[in-house]
């Protein structure tokens, strides 16, 4: 528990005449007005008031053309690019050469080709730079990606946070891959010189042979370890700024700084002795599907209930780097089934996949897993992220009802596909 005295760090004034529109906008986004105020207040982010803002100057960031990505390496089926505006140094995009409409059009063999290159990148990042990474993929190409191309981004953690659970960095990386850099960054981005040097390095490093996939038939032992959980005051800005930018697009709104003295101590956190995903009670309560090698769980805490899943191998393994080829092939099939399931359930918004392979990139359970989730509206997701530690977990009765329904529906989707 963090011992923090609530002191507002900003005051946001909304034009008095727009109060009814404000309330309607929040309702349309599925956000309770009191919840909105409570989350901002609890995080010392901002205080909302209504008044005159006629003298306000619009603060919106000027849109600029997106820079084109740089090709670093290619083989017969896969290309590797440096994004035009990388989030951090050594941020790479692994791209399928042929054009596809969505991830569900990617074959099993192509998915393995992509993962083989990703494994090579992961190994280089860990051995040469000591930095773990996020693996991020959308079902369909995003504005900052090559159109009509299946793209998987490998986003390293910042070097200084490789040994800590850096919540500020986590918020910044999440902001990048959740909204593809739409919002301003509160942390420094790589300079042109750093990007140039990084590109030069990777053009050589990627020539190496890809390491083989793991062939271990058994689970790896769970080795407990301690990590430093750091919650920085910059986290407030990392999440507050994009909320303000969303609101500014709809309303006349002015922000004013107030003095804020926020003390948030670091906390030492240890991995649990036993693994949550190897716990039979958890599996019985949250499992919605399983195969010979993998499980699919329904996430019990999500901004969109019933549209957020976790896929992981039955074999206990900490990092996706250590997955076997047969496990990766099976997981690709499961991802495609879940996407079709979400589409059939009427969830038409974007589907995001991501894997966190270290506490420094927010891996909380030491058993590699991939999130598959339907994306809510940006404002709802930002508030949920800011309030994550205090969000209620779905009650057992509701969870059981939803799990049983999804087990039946997923079985129908699989039978239909086969």
Image (spheres, rainbow, N blue to C red):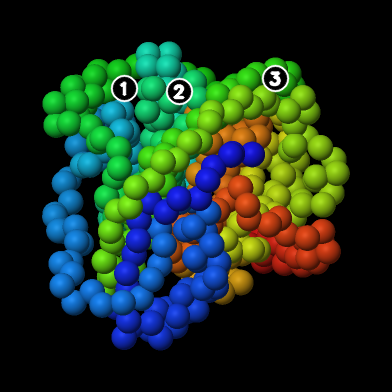
Residue 211 vs residue 95: left or right?
A: right
Let me know if residue 31 appears in the view. yes
Real-space Cα separation, disc 3 to disc 2, in angstroms: 17 Å
User: How many residues crowd mark 1 within 10 Å: few (<14), some (14–19), many (20+)?
Assistant: some
| Residue assigned mark 3 | 224
Q: Is residue 75 above or below residue 10?
A: above
Q: Residue 388, how many percent across, how many down? A: 58, 51
Q: Position of residue 259 (x, y in %)?
A: 34, 47
* Residue at left offset 49%, top offset 21%: 163
The 10 Å Cα crowd at callout 3, few under 14, some 14 to 19, many 20 or more, is few
Closer to the chain start, of discs 3 and 1, is 1
Q: CA distance from mark 3 to mark 1?
A: 33 Å
Circle on res. 206:
1
In which quadrant of the rendered view does residue 302 lie?
bottom right
Q: Do the CB atoms of the residues marked 2 and 1 lie less than 8 Å apart?
A: no
Mark 2 or mark 1: whose residue is earlier in sequence: 2
Circle 3: element type: loop
| Residue at 36% over, 76% down | 50
Residue topped by disc 2: 162
Residue 159 located left or right of residue 146? right
Q: Nearer the viewer, residue 377 or 219?
A: 377
Dot 3 or dot 2, earlier in sequence:
2
Q: From the viewer's perspective, is residue 211 above or below residue 34?
A: above
**Vertical placement of residue 124 versus 109, above or below:** above
Q: Position of residue 123 (x, y in %)?
A: 45, 20
Q: Indicate the quadrant containing the N terminus: top left, top right, bottom left or bottom right.
A: top right
Residue positioned 78% across, 28% down in the render: 274
**In the displayed structure, does residue 234 sit left or right of residue 295?**
left
Residue 115 visible? The answer is: no
Q: Residue 194: where, in percent of width, then height?
A: 19, 26
Image-based side of 251 in relation to 399, left or right: left
């Amino acid at each position: 528990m963090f011992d923090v005295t609530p002191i507002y760090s900003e005051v946001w004034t909304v034009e008095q005449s727009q109060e009814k529109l404000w309330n309607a906008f929040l309702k349309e986004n599925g956000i309770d007005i009191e919840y909105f105020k409570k989350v901002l207040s609890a995080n010392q982010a901002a205080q909302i008031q209504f008044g005159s803002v006629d003298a306000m100057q619009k603060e919106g960031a000027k849109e600029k053309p997106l820079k084109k990505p740089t090709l670093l390496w290619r083989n017969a089926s896969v290309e590797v690019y440096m994004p035009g505006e990388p989030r951090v140094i050594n941020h790479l995009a692994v791209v399928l050469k042929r054009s596809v409409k969505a991830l569900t059009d990617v074959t099993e063999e192509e998915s393995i080709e992509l993962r083989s290159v990703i494994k090579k990148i992961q190994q280089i990042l860990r051995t040469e730079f000591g930095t773990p990474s996020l693996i991020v993929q959308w079902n369909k190409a995003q504005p900052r990606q090559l159109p009509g191309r299946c793209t998987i981004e490998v986003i390293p953690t910042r070097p200084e946070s490789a040994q800590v659970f850096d919540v500020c960095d986590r918020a910044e990386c999440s902001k990048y891959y959740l909204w593809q850099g739409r919002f301003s960054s509160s942390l420094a981005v790589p300079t042109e010189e750093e990007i140039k040097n990084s590109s030069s390095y990777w053009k050589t490093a990627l020539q190496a042979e890809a390491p083989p996939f793991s062939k271990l038939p058994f689970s790896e032992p769970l080795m407990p370890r301690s990590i430093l959980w750091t919650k920085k005051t910059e986290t407030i800005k990392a999440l507050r700024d994009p909320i303000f930018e969303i609101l500014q697009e709809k309303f006349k709104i002015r922000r004013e700084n107030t003095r804020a003295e926020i003390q948030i101590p670091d906390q030492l956190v240890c991995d649990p002795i036993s693994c949550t995903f190897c716990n039979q009670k958890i599996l019985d309560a949250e499992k919605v599907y399983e195969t010979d090698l993998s499980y699919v769980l329904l996430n019990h805490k999500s901004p969109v209930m019933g549209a957020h899943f976790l896929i992981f191998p039955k074999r206990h393994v900490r990092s996706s780097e250590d997955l076997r080829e047969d496990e990766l092939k099976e997981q690709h099939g499961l991802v495609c089934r879940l996407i079709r399931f979400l589409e059939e359930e009427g969830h038409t918004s974007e589907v995001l996949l991501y894997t966190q392979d270290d506490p420094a990139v927010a891996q909380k359970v030491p058993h590699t897993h991939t999130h598959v989730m339907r994306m809510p509206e940006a404002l709802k997701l930002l508030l949920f992220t800011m309030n994550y530690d205090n969000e209620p977990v779905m009650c057992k009765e509701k969870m059981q009802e939803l799990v049983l329904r999804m087990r039946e529906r997923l079985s129908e989707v699989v039978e239909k596909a086969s």
